[in-house]
């Protein structure tokens, strides 16, 4: 972990001076490293704690049933493999708010509260309401990062986006119609390139992207567990299929972003 820490720290945000001067930077850096470490643990190495609840083609989704104070916070872990795109491209479409409403089916509005650096944004998102629960909102930072694979020096580089809730005194929770939910999300991607024969140029047919998505959402206030688990089961697979198909679609006629 120590070695991983130093490699990741060395290659952290592209806009180091701006980001590291920000009061949230130590937390952003720490949570990003923790989330990457967690995302890289395999389901098999986790002692059978994960239950598979959805599988379609290469996509596999696992959950762990967990409740805190009567609230369902079931952690989610998903793996997917998609062809024709790079991890950099997948992360760019996940991170960049300009595309968000084109693939995010749970969001009503998304607002950038602050641009901390080119690769760190602070968001306020209002989610769609699910009857009979109160509407939810979320305030979180989002950080995109590129790191070499320190486990295997010749291995594929890693692109990651981490989203994590944060308290902003100017935007106190639960003062309007929304209940503030808490989220920690990590989208991690590795790109594998099939070397083309005779030194030909790499095309999209040579690309395979391995995606790991981990998420924990605390509803922030009571919501009926049965409704919540039903939404979870329906929305997560829908999200990952819709999002990855969106990225494939957007990228197909564009030059490859390695
Ligand atoms: O990671 C994703 N998106 C990111 C960018 O937007 C961001 C979002 C994180 C997850 C937020 C969870 C939002 C749930 C809100 C209510 C759902 C509305 C559903 C509307 C249906 C039309 O990091 C992709 C996120 C994919 C989310 C899948 C759904 C997860 C459900 C988890 C339960 C949340 C409890 C909320 C209260 C519900 C009351 C019954």
Image (cartoon, rainbow, N blue to C red):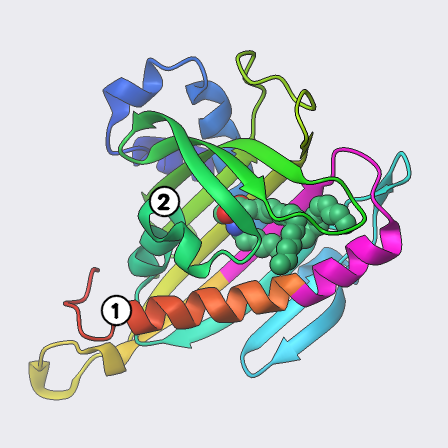
Q: Position of residue 57 (x, y in %)?
A: 56, 83
Q: Position of residue 96 (x, y in %)?
A: 33, 46
- The one of 29 and 169 positioned closer to us in this rendering: 169
Residue 147 visible to the viewer:
no
Residue at 67%, 32% in the rendered image:
178
Mark 1 Cβ inside 8 Å of ligand 1: no
Q: Nearer the viewer, mark 2 or mark 1?
A: 2
Mark 2 Cβ inside 8 Å of ligand 1: no
Residue at 72%, 57% in the rendered image:
46
Q: Which residues are magenta?
A: 212-234
Circle 2: element type? helix
Residue 246 visible to the viewer:
yes
Give the vertical position of 190 relative to 194 (above or below): above
Circle 1: element type? helix
The label on residue 251 is: 1
Q: Residue furthest bottom?
A: 197
The question of residue 232 being in magenta is answered with yes
Mark 2 and mark 1: Cα distance apart in space: 17 Å
- The one of 213 and 253 positioned closer to us in this rendering: 253
Residue at 38%, 46% in the rendered image:
95
Q: Are marks 2 and 1 in contact (CB under 8 Å)?
A: no
Tag 2 residue: 97
Give the vertical position of 163 relative to 9 (above or below): below
The question of residue 55 being in magenta is answered with no
- The one of 78 and 8 positioned closer to us in this rendering: 78
Q: Position of residue 67 (x, y in %)?
A: 86, 43
Q: Position of residue 225 (x, y in %)?
A: 87, 51
Q: Compare marks 2 and 1 and give the one earlier in the sequence.
A: 2
């Amino acid at each position: 972990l120590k070695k991983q820490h130093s490699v990741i720290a060395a290659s952290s945000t592209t806009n180091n001076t701006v980001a590291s001067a920000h009061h949230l930077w130590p937390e952003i850096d720490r949570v990003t490293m923790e989330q990457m470490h967690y995302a890289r643990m395999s389901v098999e190495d986790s002692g059978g704690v994960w239950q598979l609840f959805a599988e379609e083609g290469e996509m596999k989704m696992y959950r762990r049933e967990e409740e805190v104070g009567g609230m369902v916070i079931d952690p989610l872990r998903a793996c997917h493999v998609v062809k024709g795109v790079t991890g950099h491209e997948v992360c760019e479409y996940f991170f960049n708010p300009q595309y968000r409403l084109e693939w995010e089916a749970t969001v009503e509005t998304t607002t950038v509260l602050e641009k901390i650096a080119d690769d760190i944004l602070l968001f306020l998102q209002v989610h769609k309401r699910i009857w009979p629960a109160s509407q939810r909102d979320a305030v979180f930072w989002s950080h995109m990062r590129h790191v070499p694979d320190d486990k295997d020096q010749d291995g594929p580089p890693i692109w990651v986006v981490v989203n994590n809730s944060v308290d902003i005194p100017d935007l106190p929770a639960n003062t309007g119609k929304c209940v503030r939910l808490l989220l920690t999300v990590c989208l991690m991607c590795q790109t594998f390139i099939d070397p083309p024969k005779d030194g030909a140029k790499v095309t999209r047919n040579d690309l395979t992207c391995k995606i790991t998505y981990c998420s924990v959402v605390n509803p922030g206030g009571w919501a009926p567990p049965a409704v919540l688990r039903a939404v979870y089961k329906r929305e997560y697979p829908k999200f990952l299929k819709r999002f990855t198909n969106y990225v494939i679609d957007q990228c197909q006629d564009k030059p490859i972003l390695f």
